[in-house]
Image: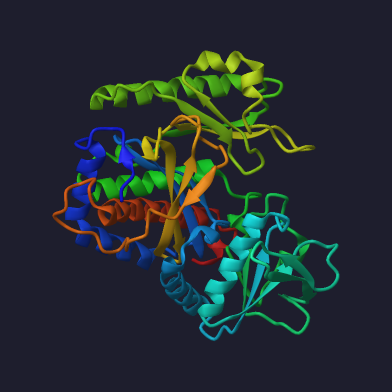
Amino acid sequence: MVPHLVTALTGPINELEQRVLESMPAIERWFRLEWMEHTPPFYTSAELRNAGFKLAPVNTNLFPGTFNHLTDEMLPLAVQAAMAAIEKICPEAKNLLLIPDGRTGSASYLENVQRMVQVFTQAGLNVRLGTLDGSVKSPTAAALPDGSKLVLEPLLRTRGRLGLKGFDPCTILLNNDLSAGVPRVLAHLHEQYLLPPLHAGWPVRRKSHHFQSYEEVAKKFAKLLGMDPWLINPLHAQCGQVDLDSAGGLDCVKTQVEALLGKVRRKYKEYGINERPFVVVKADNASGTGVLCLRDVKELDDPERRARCGGRAPSGQEPGQVIIQEGVPTFERINDAVAEPVVMMIDRYVVGGFYRVHSEQAGDDAFGAAASRYVPLAFAESVQLPRPGAKPGASAPNRFYMYGVIGRLAMLAAAYELEATDPDAENFE
């Protein structure tokens, strides 16, 4: 089943789908060559928006916390990908230390950790959980909704190694985006593999860096297919030292919002799109959670409206940076509810995905809103086996193969981004 598209089935997305399917051998070869030159992030999730006239990623997560939304049918792919990823990094690995974030009170997040433990255990590893919570002094059980338990243990640092009592891992897997900063216990580990690396966390990472990298990737891919990169790339701009509470740095934001809306209007006119464009203003790092959607730069003059945005710096810090991003409306529906596809990846492989479903939001108002439910529908059939010759928009494997391609482009952009921000890169001449 493909969710009903409000836009006409003859629109640009279906033309893009046809071109992607016809170019599948060239696309897969292109990805293989890129992965010979670049190292994929250990795991990634990409949130996509399908506007009918455009399909693009709007967020790429390097510490995905949604493995619980993978169905049992998706597990074999996830286990295979996990095996491949671990073998590349530490072939002799037998112990894996998984460090979750502090959301251990959230049932959904604990189910995510449980699913991760299941995947890596089936990949042939002894998996134990270490917590960054200094108040945990002994093994502590966290109850799951199904009645099972996860045991969180205090971390033990011995010189250059990190482990648990009686447990010395080859690899440490972070499921914590380090929004609160880099704990001392994780710094200067010289004898173990820490995945993802510390510079993948929000103390270093910026969304604007990622989308600069994505723009580069989208242009390369568009050249391969002979298409306009705008069809898969959300335009963006960035402003620094912005404090939306006090209107500090607002002139920059206004200038960039007006310029970006102008660019999008010209693209809409070029493609005959009868939609009113909007842009999204959000924090350039993870310190803010709010999202501000704007259709007119004058809306920034409203202090109450600005207060909804996450561009404010954390308490005690200087005003932060914001990213201004072209808004990509989502016109996919499941039973009249807005449906946003999310692609899950381990190493360079798509392992599954799901829809975030918003039952009440309009297409653009769903930005940043918590999903009312999750539907593991998108990759119920293999994402790697499209059906050439099937009518665009009518075949689930075809539509979801295309989602997997866009997700992998976002993952490749993350690889570019991590290379550019690697503090040790200049040592590898």
Please give the name of the residue rendered at 46% of the width and 30% of the height, measured from the top-left corner. 364
Please give the name of the residue rendered at 56% of the width and 58% of the height, measured from the top-left corner. 422
**Splitting the image into 4 quarters, where does residue 263 fall?**
top left
**Splitting the image into 4 quarters, where does residue 288 fall?**
top right
The colouring scheme, among rainbow, by chain, secondary structure or one colour, is rainbow
Q: Nearer the viewer, residue 409 or 51?
A: 51
Res. 201 in view: yes
- Give left or right: position of 48 versus 94: left
- Give left or right: position of 382 versus 352: left
Residue 159: % across, % down: 77, 77
Q: Nearer the viewer, residue 358 or 219?
A: 358
**Splitting the image into 4 quarters, where does residue 27 fall?**
bottom left
- Give left or right: position of 415 versus 189: left
Please give the name of the residue rendered at 43% of the width and 75% of the height, measured from the top-left corner. 80
Please give the name of the residue rendered at 19% of the width and 36% of the height, measured from the top-left corner. 10
Q: Does 295 sit above or below residue 66?
A: above
Q: Nearer the viewer, residue 78 or 194?
A: 78
Res. 176 in view: no
Residue 410: % across, % down: 42, 51
Q: How many marks?
A: 0
Q: Does 404 sit above or below residue 286?
A: below
Q: Does 101 sit above or below residue 114?
A: above
Q: Does 195 sit above or below residue 354?
A: below
Residue 247: % across, % down: 67, 20
Residue 197: % across, % down: 59, 62
